[in-house]
Image (cartoon, rainbow, N blue to C red):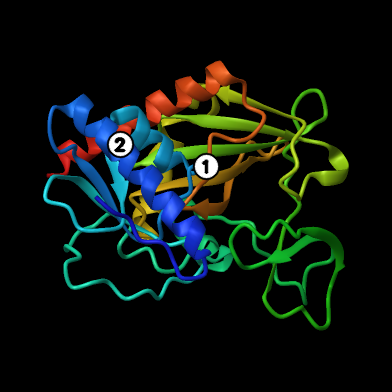
Amino acid sequence: PMIDYPSSVPRVERWGKRVRHAVQWLGLALRAGGVPPAVVVHPDAPSRRTALYKMCRALGVELTNRPRRRVLLTMRFEDATEKAAQRPAWWPAGAWNDRCDDIRKSTLERAHAQVFGYGVAVDPRAHTGRMLEKGDGNAVHDGREVVGPVDAPALGKVYQIIVNNRSADGRAVDLRLVFIRGQFPAVYLKYKPEDARYTNLTTSVELGSVEARFTPSELVSVNALMAALHVDYAELDVLRDADSGRMYGVDVNPTPWGPPAGLPAAASSEAVSAMAAALQSAAVSSK
């Protein structure tokens, strides 16, 4: 059993990772009483910090980017905003996330407006007052408030309304909703200080109740949103506006690390177990 790493990873580190993968495979084989099932991804080899890696460990399945005979599921796993990697000859049709080629915020915004009937985007040349300027790419965390109208909008930026996502105690709270083929096994509440609300810095993280945070009709719409983006597995960053009650999906990440740093160990274990169960049931039902 092997796994491929890019040539940018130093040779000694690559071999160390391969040895570790082989040792893990032997453990999985002993646990399974034979060749273990595999989640096969392409092109990236997921980091141990990814949620997918942790789900596979919980399920006792191998995670590799090489072809296997005993496959639980195949998934395109490419950590890029716009994906262009060529599929290998052995790559099967119908792999998860295979058609998810573009996760720019502007692409998400168009799909969100189509599904929900509203979105967060504003025309910076016409908008008067405060608005949020941030990069169109994924996981940039460079948001800043500006005052419109803006005569010359910056290239590669999107402009959005300021969503009042403050909780009852005044802290900004981002919701990160886990989506696995129509299932929503977890939602994280990420609390942020006021002066860092547009960054990835958190003061605390909680595991929330999906049913308490989203209505059934909203979850139906999120499912439609993911279908429009050709997503089978991802985590969606959501802001809930305290004034209007509306939810806004503002970022989609199909290669997430997780559970988030700062989540207590017991809650993290609970989230991984719930996600792993959803992944397995979705993989089985899709065959």
* Image vertical order of residue 55 relative to residue 121, above or below: above
Taking the image as shown, residue 20 lies to the left or right of residue 159, namely: left
x and y percentages locating residue 106 in the rendered image: 57, 67
Numbered label attached to residue 237 = none
Q: What kind of residue is marked 1?
A: Arg
Quarter placement of the C terminus: top left
Please give the name of the residue rendered at 22% of the width and 47% of the height, measured from the top-left corner. Answer: 73
State the residue lying farthest toward the bottom. 152
Query: What crowding class fits label 2: few (fewer than 14 Cα within 10 Å), some (14-19), or many (20 or more)?
Result: many
Residue under pointer 2 = 279
The image position of residue 77, as x and y in percent, is: 38, 57
Q: Is residue 70 left or right of residue 46?
A: left
Position in image of residue 279 (x %, y %): 30, 36
Q: Residue furthest front?
A: 12
Residue found at the very far top of the displayed protein: 266
Taking the spot 58% from the left edge, 56% from the top edge, the residue there is: 119
Asked if residue 83 shows in the view, the reply is yes
Of labels 1 and 2, earlier in sequence is 1
The dot on residue 49 is 1
Amino acid type of the residue tagged 2 in the rendering: Leu
Quadrant of res 63: top left
